Image (cartoon, grey):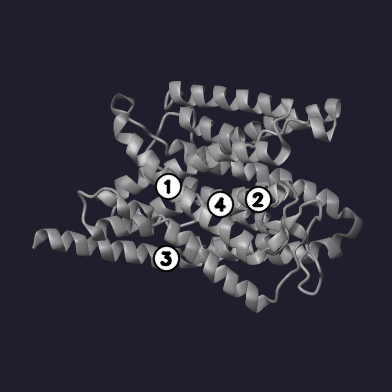
């Protein structure tokens, strides 16, 4: 529980610093912002390598996973669709409802609600003694699958944002090759997996994507640059590493610190917010030009968006009919947890200069869900124990 609350605190602290640093640093702020972006990318790579290391599939029995992937995909898609629809039809002017640009930007940012926080969830379920239960084993598969689904869907969303230009063809080729390598070589390479080694891999992985971007930008300009998001390369690197099921306390502590730093940096990347201003953020984004509502109105939207997000995560309740309703509800509530991958989506959206009130609402929704995570896990434990008692009697 302390870990989850610390993530919320760091995200909020970063949000406060994002409003103070531009004035405090003045002309030096752009240099600091660039450094924050690089450090963010390295931390995100580290986190995604760990997510990839959790990805284990029995290739001899692949049909078993088809249903699980479809359920995970639905559990990721429904919150995304619900929130995107709410943002467009409730927060935006009527004449924007048919704007392709507005839909593209909103669909990209709304994707933050899709992924379940696998790392946070697994650690908390183990802590309450559910690691041998059907709920834990099934949620382990679903959470990883909806993280994977989120990563893969970022590719067509990127294409929608910048169009099917030649660099997107390059990115698609890279994606296909990475997925092929990840599948063929899953758990194949015996690489060191202590946190220091993982950080070196993260720096190397982000360094390659950053170098590709800078080189193509140098030769072809910003419009012709090839920007490969670090999410998939880092995830695939984790996939091909031999899976180890034991994690030392020092490695776990270091991973937590890096995740906390990531949350802080995501908050620090937020654009300036002025409730009294007509717009907020970089106005090269259409939805950044939305007027900021009052804090009370923002709070109401945060609660509604959180509810929509978690209602969408109830999708697993309608599957696995061989299990009791309590087990299926426990499975669904377990999927409510959000964390680093969702914050990573917000970071990517910031790269497209998406700002405005829906960015603030998205960040605060993530904070609220992090705060509520402990309660979600308590509900899962209660339902699991109740389901077990029902079977005894």
Q: Nearer the viewer, mark 4 or mark 3?
A: 4
Q: Nearer the viewer, mark 2 or mark 3?
A: 2
Q: Nearer the viewer, mark 1 or mark 4?
A: 1
- Can see residue 116? no
Q: Quadrant of the N terminus?
A: bottom left
**Mark 2 or mark 3, which has the lower sequence index?**
2
* Mark 3 nearby-residue class (10 Å; few <14, some 14–19, many ≥20): some
Residue highlighted by disc 2: 103
**Mark 4 or mark 2, which has the lower sequence index?**
2
- Distance from disc 1 to disc 2, alpha carbons, whole Å, reads 20 Å
The residue shown at (47%, 49%) is 76
Residue 342: numbered disc: 4
**Mark 3 or mark 1, which has the lower sequence index?**
1
- Distance from disc 3 to disc 1, alpha carbons, whole Å, reads 24 Å
The residue shown at (62%, 41%) is 157
| Circle 3 SS class | helix
x and y, in percent, of residue 315 in the image: 38, 53
x and y, in percent, of residue 284 in the image: 81, 51
- Distance from disc 4 to disc 2, alpha carbons, whole Å, reads 19 Å
Q: Nearer the viewer, mark 3 or mark 1?
A: 1
Q: Quadrant of the C terminus?
A: bottom left
Q: Is residue 32 above or below residue 188?
A: below
Query: On the rendered structure, is 368 left or right of 157?
Result: left
Residue highlighted by disc 3: 374
Q: Nearer the viewer, mark 1 or mark 2?
A: 2
Residue 74: numbered disc: 1
| Circle 4 SS class | helix
């Amino acid at each position: 529980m302390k870990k989850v609350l610390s993530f919320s605190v760091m995200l909020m602290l970063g949000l406060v610093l994002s409003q103070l640093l531009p004035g405090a640093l003045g002309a030096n702020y752009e240099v600091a912002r660039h450094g924050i972006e690089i450090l963010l990318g390295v931390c995100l790579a580290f986190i995604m390598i760990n997510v990839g290391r959790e990805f284990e599939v029995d290739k001899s029995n692949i049909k078993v996973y088809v249903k699980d992937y479809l359920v995970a995909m639905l559990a990721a898609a429904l919150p995304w669709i619900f929130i995107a629809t709410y943002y467009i039809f409730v927060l935006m002017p009527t004449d924007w409802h048919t704007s392709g640009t507005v839909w593209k930007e909103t669909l990209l940012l709304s994707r933050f609600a899709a992924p379940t926080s696998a790392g946070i969830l697994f650690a908390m379920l183990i802590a309450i003694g559910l690691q041998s239960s059907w709920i834990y084993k099934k949620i382990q598969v679903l959470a990883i699958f909806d993280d994977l689904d989120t990563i893969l869907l970022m590719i067509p969303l990127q294409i929608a944002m910048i169009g099917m230009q030649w660099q997107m063809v390059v990115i698609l080729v890279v994606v296909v090759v990475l997925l092929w390598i990840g599948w063929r070589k899953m758990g194949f390479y015996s690489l060191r997996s202590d946190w220091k080694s993982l950080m070196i891999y993260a720096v190397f992985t982000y360094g390659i994507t950053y170098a590709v971007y800078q080189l193509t930008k140098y030769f072809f300009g910003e419009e012709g640059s090839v920007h490969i998001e670090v999410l998939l390369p880092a995830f695939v690197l984790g996939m091909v590493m031999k899976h180890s099921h034991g994690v030392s306390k020092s490695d776990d502590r270091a991973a937590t610190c890096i995740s906390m730093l990531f949350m802080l940096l995501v908050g620090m990347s937020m654009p300036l917010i002025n409730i009294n201003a007509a717009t907020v953020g970089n106005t090269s984004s259409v939805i950044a030009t939305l007027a900021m509502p009052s804090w009370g109105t923002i709070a109401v939207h945060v609660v509604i968006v959180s509810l929509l997000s978690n209602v969408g995560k109830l999708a697993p309740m309608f599957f696995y009919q061989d299990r009791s309703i309590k087990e299926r509800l426990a499975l669904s509530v377990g999927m409510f947890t959000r964390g680093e991958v969702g914050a990573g989506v917000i970071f990517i959206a910031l790269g497209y200069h998406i700002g405005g009130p829906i960015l603030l609402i998205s960040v605060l929704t993530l904070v609220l869900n992090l705060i509520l995570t402990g309660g979600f896990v308590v509900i899962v434990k209660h339902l699991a124990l109740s389901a077990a008692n029902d079977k005894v009697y």
